[in-house]
Amino acid sequence: MSDPPIIEVKDLKKVYRVGLVDVHALRGVNLKVARGEFLSVVGPSGSGKSTLFHIIGGLTPPSSGWVRVGDRDVSKMTDGERTNLRKTTVSFVFQKFNLLPNLTAGDNIAIARHIAGKESGRLDGFDQVLDVLGIKQRLGHKPSALSGGEQQRVAIARAIVNHPAILLADEPTGNLDTENSAQVLKVLRDVNERLGQTVLMITHNPEAAAYGHRTVHMRDGRIVE
Amino acid sequence: MINKLVLENLRHRPVRAFLSILLIAVPVTLMLTLVGLSKGTLEDTARRAKGVGADIIVRPRGSSLIGLSSAPIPQGIVDMIAKEPHVTLATGTMTHPLGGLSSVAGVDLEKFNQMSGGFKYIQGGKFENPNDIIVDEYFARQNKVGVGGKLTVLNLDWRVCGVVEPGKLGRVFLPLAVLQDKTGNTGKLSQIYVKVDSPESIPKVIDALKAKLVDYPIYSMEELTSLISVSSVPLLEGFINVVVGVSIVISFSVVCLSMYMTVLQRTREIGILKSLGASRFYILDIILREAAIFGITGTVIGIGFSFATRLVIQRMVPGSLTQSIVPGWWPIAGMIALSASLLGAMYPGLRAALQDPIEALAYE
């Protein structure tokens, strides 16, 4: 008997109110993601990819439908429970890196540990991860002193430092050149393979999408293939 | 880690942090300076009253404890008091306001010296000529005069004949008869100082004087100096409360505005922290710690500034104002500044804590 999916989405809908207009960002999404899977999500702008990630990651509740992450129903979670989900189970990597500009790279990673209520000391084996990411010598620098590729690798380190079950990467290579993009994608695949973390990645780039085990396409708030 | 983040945030915007702290330090300085001035001036008044060397003081009918009175006491009463049993010396003085907090005292120098142990002259000596005036060291410094210098008092020119150590009755002295004459109070006094043969005699003499001088406030000097306090000066306590209130409003407003700007500037960072799983309390904690740093640092700088204001007052107007340093008020001022800062940060802090993470992350 196969393991139950780590993420299961059923008839997920999300309507935003923008001024007086209702925007239907998701119009009934159904999706299953297996534990340890690297899933690429592609689709044009406005197709609802980011909204889907935000709901799975507990940044916003759905308007209707059902989302299960692990054994928990995200759609029924309170704000505090969704905060706890982000702290323990799901983490994000963003296109714009989103590092705290006043902290060093090392402190950007450490604050994720602090928020999770864990010791600020280095994790066992995390040195190796930093080696793989190629940022070990750059931890004392602030984001403004790092290249885009380095910043994104710090963001990945921050995202995996607490060993979340799921990593949601929203166009992680969108602001990077080809070389840095390739490095980041390799790192994501490494994270998926070595640490067994489930990775969902939004991308516009078919080459990037090819790093995943599977690709789903979104259009107009629905998964189309 | 939160402290590190807060300190790094402050370091990142040093001008905003500096101005916020400065604007909290100013009302703290205001509070401490006003309280220090009140206490210092009253302590100086008590010190100078004690410096007269008397055991008992007789004040005019209907006068307040330390207010300046005119000269309504008939001079003949001095002789009557001097004849009382146990009284070894009685001398009357007259006090005439010079504007502001300054006054000139008319003294019978011989009797005043007997009672007080005598002026200690830093320069010059006693009255020699009808237009001679004696001033204390602080008044001389404030008015930049020395022995032989000219001084205009009561719209008349006087020659400074002596500069004395401060601490006895007043800061400017004229012969009693001269002051009475120049102010149209011949034969009148503002108060009478009485010395008795032993401390045990003080209550007896007071009782005897009260029986004869009905309605005259008569105090032992011990009692008088113990009664000289902020609450004995009409409206002073209320004025201090007003300044404290203004300080609270200023500190609250400064921190509220500053933290509101901070929350706006750091919207995206708040979104990042929320995406990492930071709770509402975690975000609020960051904002409140920053406000607490403003309040505490502002208090420390305000305390430092109060030493500076004392120095300025000592240099500029030593003859008019005396400011004490009142450490007992440091924690009070600190609590006021800290409470106002935390209250001021509460609204922006809650606003940050309740921010939608997606909107915050999209903020440019």
Image: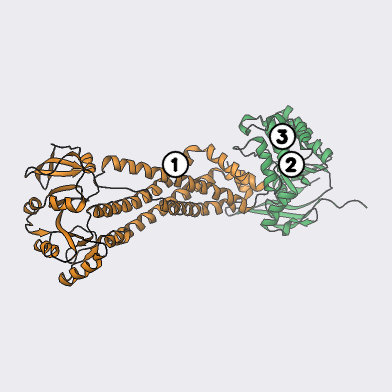
Chain colours: A green, B orange
Q: Disc 3 residue type?
A: Arg
Quarter of the figure that contains the C terminus of chain A: top right
Q: Residue at x 38, y 47 (%)?
A: B29
Q: Position of residue B41 (x, y in %)?
A: 29, 51
For numbered disc 2, what is the local secondary structure? loop
Q: Nearer the viewer, residue B11 or B91?
A: B91
Which residue is disc 2 drawn over? A161
For numbered disc 1, what is the local secondary structure? helix
Q: CA distance from mark 3 to mark 2?
A: 12 Å
Do we see residue B239 in this rendering? yes
Instruction: Please state which of the two labelled residues, at mark 3 or mark 1, is closer to the viewer.
Output: 1
Instruction: Please state which of the two labelled residues, at mark 3 or mark 2, is closer to the viewer.
Output: 2
Mark 1 near mark 2, Cβ–Cβ under 8 Å? no
Task: Say if labels 1 and 2 share a chain.
Answer: no
For numbered disc 3, what is the local secondary structure? helix
Q: Disc 1 residue type?
A: Leu
Q: Position of residue B179 (x, y in %)?
A: 10, 51
Q: Residues within 10 Å of mark 3 (few under 14, many from 20)?
A: many
Q: Earlier in the sequence, mark 3 or mark 2?
A: 3
Identify whether B10 is placed above or below B214: above
Q: What label does residue A168 carry, if any? A: none
Mark 3 near mark 2, Cβ–Cβ under 8 Å? no
Q: Nearer the viewer, residue A182 or B292?
A: B292
Q: Nearer the viewer, residue B74 or A61?
A: B74
Which residue is disc 3 drawn over? A153
Q: CA distance from mark 3 to mark 1?
A: 37 Å
In the rendered structure, the answer to whether residue A95 lies left or right of residue B188 reads: right
Task: Say if labels 3 and 1 share a chain.
Answer: no
Q: Which chain letter matches label 3? A: A
Q: Which chain letter matches label 1? A: B
Q: What label does residue B19 carry, if any? A: 1
